[in-house]
Image (spheres, rainbow, N blue to C red):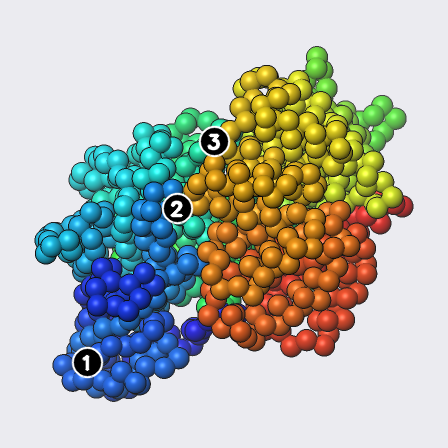
């Protein structure tokens, strides 16, 4: 599925042959003398490198054409450029290769993305190079272990703002063309270089780093200037600098620090050295809850931590992708807990969001070790997942507890010092931690990093005639597919209901291993209302509850005082629901009882989404309408009681719009568009208007003219994206045909619009009209697998949108599974395409198990 794949074996052979020293890269964005100035640009790269011996290798370039090329001043034949490679025949010693190329702007968020803002016709460009897309902008040796110093120059209109990884060393103008020459960088991998150019608005500041003054800026599109809360963004950034420089004891290494909020971005953010890019959805046009700000803070700190772990020290190859991503996932809540002085809330938020992602990913048929075998770029792209990020971070948190925080930080400091500007593998980090802690980490690594799967922990006890524990043990099990039983350090919390609160009355810590561990400390202790394994969320494991604890959870979860304990309980309840051990209707009741008073808005958001999924997908068909009605009415009741203008009110209003299935509910939210029947304190702002319009479109309760009127009123790219999503969700044949054509057969839809269309296409209650698209999905997947038609050139993000989001839904999951299995048996799909489809198939099979359990 990955276009122009690179294998680990090939790049290892290249790194044995050559070493790189310096790049001089010039990118011309003026379009002068080009036939297609809005779709193409030119670049020239001059690379100084050395060959250890005579041999043959190649430069990487995904471009329209090589215009000219020389090796040591001798012309190379541009026609030799083929299959995204320019071959080189080398003699031993130093060399200089120079390549001028015609390249293409991206509309898929890969390479150099070009965007024109419909609200003011401003032009905005930014690069996105991870994993291997620097070669879409300039010829290079595209692999992380061939680091070099970069000197980048950009030609662009004089009115533009232009940024790269380093500060401008010289600027000059000729007519309306400016030339920005940037100072030489520290050694970088190609994927960490960056260019940002266009009509950006900038807010500038500075920070007194331990290594000297760091110039800072925050940038966005001109049209988003009213929504740029730069002061808050910079405050978070400076706090993070303080924590990381204090604990890593390694000054920031890249001179200046720009943070740019860019349009149509595929991911959350990218840690380009000194020039970080973020999706500009993080600039909030409408009212959001505290959870959104916390998520943005986490992302800011995640990317900042990469300046040390990932940029200063970089993995040798993508096998150790998890090293940088897991570390950053751990570092962001660590930094928040340090500078806010709140040790629990950041980790409760992590548990309620990121860790649940890890548990889901680890139970899919595609699960893999944290430290995985990345044989090529295709494997790398698929492993940007909950294992690499959230499970890795969860396991690192365990490692911190295992070796101690100070020993962990001491090991990290030694690691940064010893490998600064170099490339490493897992063994280098483990060696540093072994030295600092004295712990043998070989068995820990084998259990936790090198084997997939999640364990389940459950209490097993007997009571005496007085209600005290006569015996107590913790049982551990693993899946048949991944039977590893691990060593865990966990806390066991005992909670009792009293005076309206569910309070912890006792806590013990215990080491467990193997299938059963006795806990003699609890013998003769009175059975409490709630026994909570993995209290304080110390380990990575699913937990189960005894029957009394389960009933306490259903009726009294909201009474738990600790946000971290509640997070563990919310996670346990949802996991039991997904595993068909807790009926979906009971999860719905639990959510409705507890979500209205939950103080962690990240938990509120997660539980509201999970409650709707339980009602819509995990209930048996015979009771589904009743449970969906219960959910709709329950959310309306909570919204009616919510404090005016509160975060809860905003979250519940959005959940209510998504929950509506009744005619009365549709009429109610439709009236909100006219600012009628609106709960006191609730503002029907742009984002909420679009949500209401989209949900009414799902119900067939809004005309096309209303969607178009909203688009015209919101003449922004976000407005266009929302309008496309609303049209895709409509329950009539014409809308579905048009949406399918845009998503699958068209070639002009930008990436973010494409994603929203795919996400909204399949809707519950529209099965009859969508039935023909089951077989069309199979055909599209085969085309993607074979890179046929438009899929010969479309980027991986667009392919993932189709494969993941257009996978069929059905009220007859058993029938759908039979069709999918029959098709898979006779099709010949690539491993990467098959993986995505089997993941979605697993979701359908899980829903079927839940439905059958509910009907039993």
What's the CA distance linking mark 2 and mark 1?
42 Å
Question: Which one is earlier in the sequence, the residue at label 2 or at label 1?
Answer: 1
According to the image, label 3 marks what residue?
286
Compared across the picture, whether 830 is left or right of 576 comes to: left
Closer to viewer: mark 2 or mark 1: 2
| SS at mark 1 in the image | strand
Q: Is residue 541 above or below residue 233?
A: below
Can I make out residue 830 in this image? yes
What's the CA distance linking mark 3 and mark 2?
19 Å
- Quadrant in which residue 259 is drawn: top left
Image coordinates of residue 197 in percent, x first then y, are 27, 51
Closer to viewer: mark 1 or mark 3: 3
Q: Residue at x 36, y 50 (%)?
A: 116
Q: Residue at x 79, y 65 (%)?
A: 818
**Mark carried by residue 70:** 1
Count of numbered tags: 3
Residues at badges 3 and 2 in contact (C-beta under 8 Å)?
no
What's the CA distance linking mark 1 and mark 3?
53 Å
Compared across the picture, whether 714 is left or right of 816 comes to: left
Q: Residue at x 58, y 38 (%)?
A: 706
Image coordinates of residue 152 in percent, x first then y, are 20, 59
Question: Which one is earlier in the sequence, the residue at label 1 or at label 3?
Answer: 1
Residues at badges 1 and 3 in contact (C-beta under 8 Å)?
no
- Camera-side residue of 671 and 271: 671
According to the image, label 2 marks what residue?
118
Question: Which one is earlier in the sequence, the residue at label 3 or at label 2?
Answer: 2
Q: Residue at x 81, y 41 (%)?
A: 624
Image coordinates of residue 270 in percent, x first then y, are 38, 51
Q: Is residue 848 above or below residue 287?
A: below
Q: Is residue 838 above or below residue 293?
A: below
Compared across the picture, whether 330 is left or right of 65 comes to: right
């Amino acid at each position: 599925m990955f276009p122009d794949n690179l294998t680990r074996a090939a790049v290892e052979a290249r790194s044995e042959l050559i070493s790189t020293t310096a790049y001089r890269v010039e990118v011309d964005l003026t379009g002068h003398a080009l036939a297609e100035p809005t779709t193409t640009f030119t670049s020239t790269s001059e690379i100084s490198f050395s060959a250890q011996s005579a041999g043959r290798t190649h430069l990487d370039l995904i471009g329209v054409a090589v215009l000219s090329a020389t090796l040591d001043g001798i012309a190379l034949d541009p026609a030799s450029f083929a299959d995204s490679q320019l071959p080189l025949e080398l003699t031993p010693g130093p060399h200089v290769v120079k390549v001028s190329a015609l390249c293409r702007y991206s509309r898929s968020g890969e390479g150099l993305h070009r965007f024109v803002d419909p609200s003011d016709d401003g032009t905005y460009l930014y690069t996105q190079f991870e994993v291997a897309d620097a070669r879409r902008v300039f010829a290079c040796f595209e692999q992380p272990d061939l680091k070099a110093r970069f000197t980048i120059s950009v030609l662009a209109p004089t009115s533009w703002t232009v940024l790269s990884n380093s500060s401008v060393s010289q600027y000059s103008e000729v007519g309306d063309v400016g030339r920005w020459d940037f100072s030489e960088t520290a050694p970088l991998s190609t994927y960490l270089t960056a260019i940002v150019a266009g009509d950006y608005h900038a807010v500038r500041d500075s920070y007194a780093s331990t290594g000297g003054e760091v110039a800072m800026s925050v940038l966005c599109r001109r049209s988003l200037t009213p929504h740029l809360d730069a002061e808050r963004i910079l405050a978070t950034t400076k706090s993070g600098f303080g924590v990381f420089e204090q604990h890593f004891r390694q000054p920031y290494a890249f001179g200046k620090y720009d943070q740019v909020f860019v349009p149509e971005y595929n991911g959350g953010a990218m840690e380009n050295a000194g020039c970080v890019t973020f999706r500009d959805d993080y600039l909030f046009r409408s009212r959001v809850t505290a959870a959104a700000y916390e998520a943005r803070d986490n992302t800011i700190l995640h990317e900042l931590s990469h300046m040390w772990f990932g940029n200063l020290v970089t993995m040798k190859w993508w096998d150790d992708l998890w090293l940088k991503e897991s570390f950053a996932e751990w570092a962001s809540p660590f930094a928040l807990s340090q500078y806010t002085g709140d040790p629990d809330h950041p980790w409760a938020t992590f548990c309620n969001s990121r860790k649940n992602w890890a548990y889901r990913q680890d139970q899919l048929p595609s699960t893999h070790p944290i430290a995985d075998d990345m044989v090529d770029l295709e494997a790398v792209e698929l492993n940007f997942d909950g294992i690499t990020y959230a499970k890795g971070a969860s396991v690192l948190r365990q490692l911190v507890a295992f070796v101690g925080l100070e020993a962990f930080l001491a090991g990290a400091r030694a690691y940064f010092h010893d490998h600064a500007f170099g490339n490493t593998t897992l063994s280098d980090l483990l060696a540093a931690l072994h030295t600092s802690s004295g712990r043998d980490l070989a068995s820990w690594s084998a259990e936790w990093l090198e084997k997939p799967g999640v364990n389940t922990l459950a209490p097993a006890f007997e009571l005496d005639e007085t209600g005290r524990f006569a015996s107590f043990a913790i049982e551990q099990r693993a899946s048949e597919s991944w039977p590893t039983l691990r060593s865990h350090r966990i806390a066991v919390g005992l909670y009792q209901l009293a005076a309206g609160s569910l309070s912890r009355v006792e806590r013990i810590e215990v080491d467990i291993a193997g299938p059963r561990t006795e806990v003699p400390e609890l013998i003769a202790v009175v059975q409490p209302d709630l026994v909570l394994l993995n209290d304080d969320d110390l380990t990575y494991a699913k937990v189960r509850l005894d029957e009394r604890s389960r009933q306490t959870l259903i009726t009294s979860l909201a009474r738990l005082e600790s946000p971290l304990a509640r997070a563990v309980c919310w996670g346990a309840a949802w996991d039991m629901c997904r595993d068909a051990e807790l009926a979906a209707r009971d999860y719905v009741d639990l959510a409705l009882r507890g979500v209205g008073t939950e103080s962690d808005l990240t938990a509120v958001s997660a539980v509201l989404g999970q409650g709707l999924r339980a009602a819509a997908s995990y209930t048996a068909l015979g009771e589904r309408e009743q449970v969906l009605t219960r959910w709709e009415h329950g959310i309306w009741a909570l919204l009616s009681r919510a404090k005016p203008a509160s975060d809860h009110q905003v979250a519940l209003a959005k959940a209510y719009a998504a929950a509506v299935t009744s005619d009365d509910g549709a009429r109610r939210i439709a009236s909100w568009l006219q600012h009628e029947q609106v709960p006191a304190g609730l503002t029907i702002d742009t984002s909420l208007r679009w949500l209401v319009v989209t949900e009414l479109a799902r119900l067939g309760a809004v005309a096309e003219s209303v969607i178009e009127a909203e688009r015209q009123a919101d003449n922004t790219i976000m407005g266009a994206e929302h309008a496309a999503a609303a049209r895709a969700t409509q329950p009539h044949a014409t809308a579905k045909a048009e949406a399918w054509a845009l998503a699958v057969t068209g070639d002009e839809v930008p990436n973010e619009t494409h994603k929203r269309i795919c996400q909204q296409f399949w809707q519950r209650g529209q099965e009859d009209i969508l039935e023909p698209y089951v077989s069309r999905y199979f055909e599209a997947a085969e085309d993607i697998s074979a890179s046929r038609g438009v899929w010969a050139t479309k980027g991986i993000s667009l392919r993932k949108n189709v494969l993941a989001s257009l996978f069929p839904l059905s009220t007859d999951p058993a029938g759908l599974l039979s069709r999918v299995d029959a098709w898979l048996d006779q099709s010949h799909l690539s491993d990467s395409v098959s993986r995505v489809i089997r993941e979605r198939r697993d979701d359908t099979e899980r829903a079927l198990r839940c439905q059958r359990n509910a009907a039993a």
